[in-house]
Amino acid sequence: MFLRNRFFILLVVVALMMAFGLLYPPLFHVGAVVLALLLALTAVDMIWLYLGGEVGVRRQCEERFSNGEDNTVTLTVNNRSAMRLGVTLLDEVPPELQERHLQWRITVGAHEQRTMTYHLRPTQRGELTFGHALAYVSTFLGLAERCFRGARPTTVKVYPSYLMLRRLALNPVSDRLVEQGMKRIRRVGSNTEFEHIKEYVTGDDYRHINWKASARRMQPMVNVYHDERSQEVYSIVDMGRTMQLAAEGMTLLDYSINAALALSFVAINKDDQAGVATFDVHFNTLVKASRRTGQMHRIMEALYNATTAFGESDYSELCVALDQRLKRRSFIVLFTAFDAMNSLQRQLPYLRQISKRHRLLVVFFRDEKLRDYAASPSTDIEDYYQRVVAEKMIHERRLIADMLQQQGIHSVLTTTHHLVVDVVNKYLEMKARRMLT
């Protein structure tokens, strides 16, 4: 049981009345009467709360959260008493999320139920622990309040962005995604092996229209083809210290893991076999490429709690591990962060060695804020030199892409915002051109 601010405000008013009563004695007696009345009403308020003011609080959320996405949490307050109550609702969210303003003041009628919904956006994978959901209950007098604890402490696992996979599942990999702004697809070439006939949708190649089937169904029908051979597609994520750079609250490592998950989902839906691996100082996790049922769950379990030792990534260890464990020529997508030419030159021999046995695509990042800063006007000499340095860094990343191309290694230089779109588009383009083998 607690006293509310209203009680203390009235108590201060009574104290002032009694203090001024030293100058005007009748005011002192009025203050004494008001004080007695205040104490009596407070006692009555406490008795009402103790005997009848009972509420229940329940929290509802997913057993797992999606990293970098808005996850819905619902709090339900159930007034079990026969009187109208004011409720201050407070949820003890995980301290890692730094949410300090999740508090609501609502009114709940007799035997009524109210629901409050809010969203949480985690920016790191792992486990988050919720505390209790607290309800501070008061009557119409508002002098005292009673605390009820509901929603026992709960642990939620934060996985890579599986909500993104739900969107991809609801919107198959086709040009229909262009209309929703999710994806830009460039169709190149055509497949050769017939699979089935389906209804025409926007984006299908009109050259594949089956006129006989269209005449029978009285609507456009198209032939669907697929590649003759399933390709192994591996997403390899660098977990070295350079991948710990942050952008909009998330690290490059988290963005890369989300993109690896999306690429695996698209590859499986394109009849390829998807797998993932991680490395830093050592070669860590490897999920063998497959398209069996449950493969996406295995990939998510391997990635959801992946952490780094903040060491320098050992590309020689990566080369040895790939030679030993991948017996078949595969399409390898390497997510890493090359920020200068000398960092590429140290690892270039190992990248060339990997590209001899596999088809290699290197994905690294450009800094959008750095580009905006370099394009803004200078204000003084020091600012001018800083912009020159920024332009030099931007130019070096373009040189890195050119150097990789000269070595016969494909690359994608992208921003965190366009990472998923650019990687998936590059995979689809190379697959259409039969460049994965």
Image: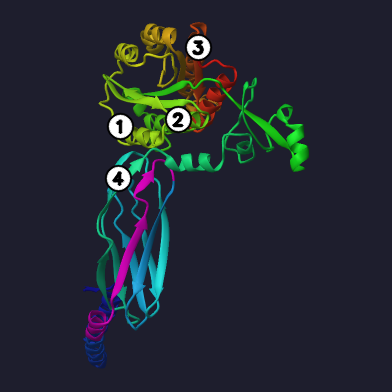
Of tags 4 and 1, which is closer to the observer?
1
- The residue wearing badge 1 is 306
- The residue wearing badge 3 is 399
Residue type beneath disc 1: Ala
Q: Position of residue 11 (x, y in %)?
A: 25, 79
Of tags 2 and 4, which is closer to the observer?
2
Give the CA separation, mark 3 to mark 1: 31 Å
- The residue wearing badge 4 is 96
Looking at the rendered image, the quarter that the N terminus falls into is: bottom left
Q: Position of residue 118 (x, y in %)?
A: 42, 56
Closer-to-camera residue (329/321)? 329
Judge the density around disc 3: few (<14), some (14-19), many (≥20) Cα neighbours within 10 Å.
Answer: some
Judge the density around disc 1: few (<14), some (14-19), many (≥20) Cα neighbours within 10 Å.
Answer: some
Identify the residue shown where x is 40% and y is 46%.
Answer: 121
Of tags 3 and 1, which is closer to the observer?
1
Question: Left or right: where does residue 210 sit relative to residue 285?
Answer: right
Mark 1 residue element:
loop
Magenta residue span? 43-69
Mark 4 residue element:
helix
Tell me, for residue 264, which label it has, or none. Answer: 2
Residue type beneath disc 4: Glu
Give the CA separation, mark 4 to mark 3: 39 Å
User: In the rendered image of this protein, does residue 318 appear above or below residue 176?
Assistant: above
Count the marks: how many?
4
Q: Earlier in the sequence, mark 4 or mark 3?
A: 4
Give the CA separation, mark 3 to mark 2: 29 Å
Give the CA separation, mark 4 to mark 1: 17 Å
Q: Quadrant of residue 26?
A: bottom left
Is label 3 in contact with label 1 (beta carbons under 8 Å)? no
